[in-house]
Image (cartoon, rainbow, N blue to C red):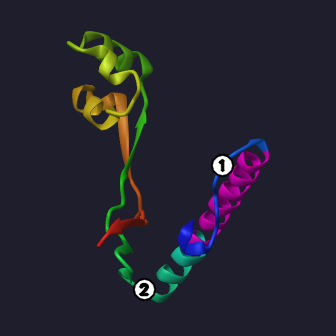
């Protein structure tokens, strides 16, 4: 925010509201600008964009996993030594390793997911 010349000091209810409103506006603007940048990068065939201290790129196209058999998934989770580890689904890709093959399908994504990373 300092780079944009924004003072986001919170000292009372009004400054809190103002700060949150600016934060929402920045988030929405960032989403739109990222989408426009992605479209331009795809159109022009640009691989990686170097920024000051960051890079914007990725070759990763994550695989989507869709469960087809909820009962098999539930039985698998219940049968694991630490079932609560999987309840949050942060470990979904690890859970899939335990599932029978007919209980899920994998779908390869065609487009990479681009992220900002420290250069």
The 10 Å Cα crowd at callout 2, few under 14, some 14 to 19, many 20 or more, is few
The x and y percentages for residue 79 are 25, 10
Q: Earlier in the sequence, mark 1 or mark 2?
A: 1
Against 6, residue 88 (above or below) is above
Corner quadrant of residue 32: bottom right
Corner quadrant of residue 12: top right
Report whether residue 94 is seen: yes
Against 106, residue 84 (above or below) is above
- Residue at left 76%, top 41%? 13
Against 8, residue 58 (above or below) is below
Q: Residue tagged by mark 1?
A: 10
Against 46, residue 58 (above or below) is above
- Residue at left 42%, top 66%? 114
How far apart are labels 1 and 2 at the CA level?
Answer: 43 Å
Q: Residue tagged by mark 2?
A: 45
The x and y percentages for residue 7 are 64, 63
Magenta residues, start to end = 14-34
Label the magenta part by its dominant secondary structure. Answer: helix
């Amino acid at each position: 925010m300092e780079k944009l010349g924004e003072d986001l000091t919170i000292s009372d209810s009004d400054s809190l509201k103002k700060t949150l409103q600016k934060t929402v506006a920045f988030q929405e603007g960032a989403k739109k600008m990222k989408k426009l940048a992605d479209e331009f990068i795809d159109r022009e065939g640009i691989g990686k964009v170097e920024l000051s201290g960051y890079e914007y790129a990725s070759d990763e196209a994550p695989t989507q996993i869709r469960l087809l058999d909820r009962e098999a998934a539930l039985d698998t989770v219940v049968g694991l030594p630490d079932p609560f580890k999987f309840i949050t689904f942060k470990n979904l890709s690890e859970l899939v390793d335990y599932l029978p093959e007919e209980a899920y399908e994998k779908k390869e994504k065609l487009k990479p997911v681009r992220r900002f990373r420290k250069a």
